[in-house]
Image (cartoon, rainbow, N blue to C red):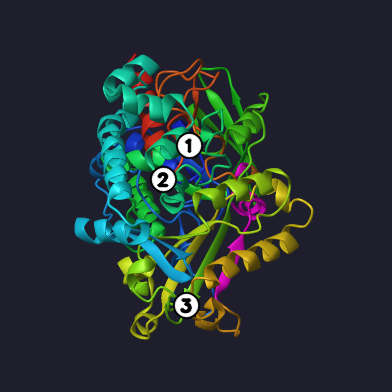
Amino acid sequence: MNAAEGPRTYDAVIVGAGHNGLVAAAYLARAGRSVLVLERLDHTGGAAVSTRPFAGVDARLSRYSYLVSLLPRKIVQDLELDVRLRTRTISSYTPTERGGRHTGLLVGGGERRTREAFARLTGSDREYRAWQRFYDMTGRVARRVFPTLTAPLPTREELRRTVDDEEAWRILFEEPLGIAIEERFADDLVRGVVLTDALIGTFADAHEPSLAQNRCFLYHVIGGGTGAWDVPVGGMGALTDALADAARAAGAVLATGHEAVRVDTDGRTAEVTHRTAAGEGVVGARHVLVNASPRELARLTGDTPPPPAEGAQLKVNMLLERLPRLRDSSVDPREAFAGTFHIAEGYGQLAAAHAQAAAGELPAAPPSEIYCHSLTDPTILGPDLAARGHHTLTLFGLHTPARLFERDNEAVREELLTSTLAQLDAHLAEPLAGCLATDADGRPCLEARSPLDLERDLGLPGGNIFHRELSWPHAQEGTGRWGVETRHANVLLCGAGAVRGGGVSGVPGHNAAMAVLEAGRV
């Protein structure tokens, strides 16, 4: 719908139809508010979409965001979303070579199998017992912290009392995570598997003094109160399609192809200027919710922008004719790729890759993790592909900051892709290239995206998937009651850059809607 076809003034105008903007729109419209969503692209969903990226191939991939952990059940229930999530039966597999023998660590498939896998790799039960104790601790924190994400921001001391575990508080909130990992685990591979959750989309060392790695780790282990990362049935686009349907059904107007270019506000009313193929228009709003980065918010309002953000990941999507065989023949590829398949993510390897990237070089052994969506949810494949045994693979590379791509994005991306896949091939009994499907034009079904590509395609600042560094989930100076407030009383930030943002959660969208509804009751 064209925005000009609706009323000239809305209770809320939302800039950006990513999942957080859609959550906010659905909540506000269900509460009886008039809502307009302006989206620059020709479709809703933002980074949480499903697409068919390979010409003539009936495979619907979660192209950018691909797993769900932080989405509260409360949002699904409140908005009556028709969304199904499936739990992965395998948590992870990490291949390695020891004593000239190809082996690895399989986590999942039941406690007995996991215990045996640890013993087979390390020679004793010590690392497994340490693993259990450590994740029992993070599980307790998850059950206590996760419910606070959709409530007004607690103070730091209130959150500390909620955690009610001084050792856990020290490990997660006060000292670099590397200290706890090195104190509790002896095996380099096990240490690396633990650390990876602290590095997804976050360029940091295990001992980074800013604790950026701790914040990333915290969000990765508290999701759903369990830390489980689930697969959205039908692909990530099924979730955002359900959110768009919920918003429309409640009366929100979703206007794609409408790019917001300016927000003018006096703190009580606002005007949003938007651009379409037909020209510019202006709509009035009592509240404006910006589902974009803090830098984009500053551009729209004319405020001083925050420091630049920087992403640090390589994203690769693939379609295979078959899953490759592994050099570790004790593991079925259908299990190894069903969870998170860690590549070059030993503790020492991660430290070396970070040091090389920080020095301006591509990592010699790029770390990455891979998973196969279609093993858990074959519905994303057309019937013919599924019958012939095709599978998707999604790869997420670490420690590749945007600065490395600035000299020649395409050339550096290809160089990095080649070396990343070589690290995977070292653990395969057959080259991955021989397993790739081809598209209608005979090209391999493989696409790679650097941080600079993500900035261009999605507007992510510096390609940062969180829009900026993740924040602690408690109040800090200037964060406001819900963590979405800005210096303008009627302009709110409801994207990943809000406090308690990041990931596919809907939390900033929920919290911005609650802030608007509270303001209406004052």
Q: Secondary structure at mark 3?
A: strand
Residue 220 versus residue 449: which sits nearer the camera? Answer: 220
Rendered location of residue 415, percent (x, y): 70, 64
Q: Is residue 184 left or right of residue 260?
A: left
The CA distance from mark 3 to mark 2 is 36 Å
Residue type at tag 3: Leu
Q: Secondary structure at mark 2?
A: loop
Q: Earlier in the sequence, mark 3 or mark 2?
A: 2
Residue type at tag 1: Gly
- Looking at the rendered image, the quarter that the C terminus falls into is top left
The CA distance from mark 3 to mark 1 is 36 Å
Residue 415 versus residue 121: which sits nearer the camera? Answer: 121
Q: Quadrant of residue 134?
A: top left
Q: Which residue has dot 3 on it?
A: 320
Q: Which residue has dot 1 on it?
A: 178
Query: How many other residues sit within 10 Å of disc 1, few (<14), some (14-19) or many (≥20)?
Result: many
Which residue reaches farthest right?
407
The CA distance from mark 1 to mark 2 is 12 Å
**Numbered circle sitting on residue 186:** 2
Q: Are marks 1 and 2 in contact (CB under 8 Å)?
A: no
Q: Which residues are magenta?
A: 445-461
Residue 203 versus residue 440: which sits nearer the camera? Answer: 203
Residue 105 versus residue 27: which sits nearer the camera? Answer: 105
Query: How many other residues sit within 10 Å of disc 2, few (<14), some (14-19) or many (≥20)?
Result: some
Rendered location of residue 68, percent (x, y): 36, 50
> For the point 27% across and 49% down, which residue is it?
81
